Image: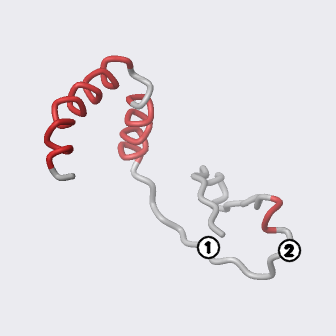
C-alpha cells in the first residue's frame, strides 16, 4: 500500500505526517524524504490541467484519427 503527499516543512524543521485510516492496522511504514522541485510540481499541475483543455483534447483526437487506418492495417 502506498501513500504519497507533498508537505511543507515547519519552521522548526519538523514534519508531521497524518496517515490515512487504511494504515491504522499497520505496525511499520517506510518513509522516504525527497526534495521537491517546485518547477516540477508546477509542470505536473499544468499537465493535469491539459487533460481538461478542449484544444489539447481536440489535437489528441485529430492525431488518433490520423493513425486509425494504419492501426487497422496491423490486424
Q: Quadrant of residue 5?
A: bottom right
On screen, 73 above or below 15?
A: above
Q: State the quadrant of the N terminus.
A: bottom right
On screen, 34 above or below 56?
A: below
Q: Which residue is mark 2?
A: 25
Q: Which residue is mark 1?
A: 31
Depth check, front residue: 5 or 1? 1
On screen, 37 above or below 50?
A: below
Tell me where residue 67 appears, x and y as whole percent.
Answer: 17, 37
Q: Residue at x 63, y 77 (%)?
A: 30
SS class, disc 2: loop
Question: Mark 2 packing: few (<14 Cα in 10 Å), some, or many (20+)?
Answer: few
CA–CA distance in space, label 2 to label 1: 17 Å
**Disc nearest the viewer among 2 and 1:** 2
Depth check, front residue: 3 or 33? 3
Which numbered disc flags the more N-terminal residue, 2 or 1?
A: 2
Q: Quadrant of residue 26?
A: bottom right
Residue 43: image tag: none
Q: Quadrant of residue 65?
A: top left
Q: Residue at x 21, y 36 (%)?
A: 68
Tell me where residue 45 appears, x and y as whole percent.
Answer: 44, 36
- 66 sits to left or right of 48: left
Depth check, front residue: 20 or 50? 50
SS class, disc 1: loop
On screen, 27 above or below 54?
A: below
Q: Residue at x 24, y 33 (%)?
A: 64
- Give the image's coloring scheme: secondary structure
Q: Residue at x 55, y 72 (%)?
A: 32
Amino acid at each position: 500500500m502506498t501513500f504519497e503527499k507533498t508537505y511543507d516543512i515547519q519552521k522548526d524543521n519538523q514534519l508531521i505526517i497524518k496517515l490515512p485510516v487504511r494504515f491504522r492496522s499497520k505496525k511499520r511504514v517506510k518513509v522516504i524524504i525527497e526534495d521537491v522541485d517546485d518547477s516540477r510540481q508546477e509542470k505536473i499541475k499544468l499537465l493535469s490541467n491539459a487533460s481538461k483543455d478542449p484544444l489539447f483534447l481536440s489535437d489528441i483526437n485529430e492525431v488518433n484519427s490520423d493513425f486509425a487506418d494504419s492501426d487497422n492495417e496491423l490486424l
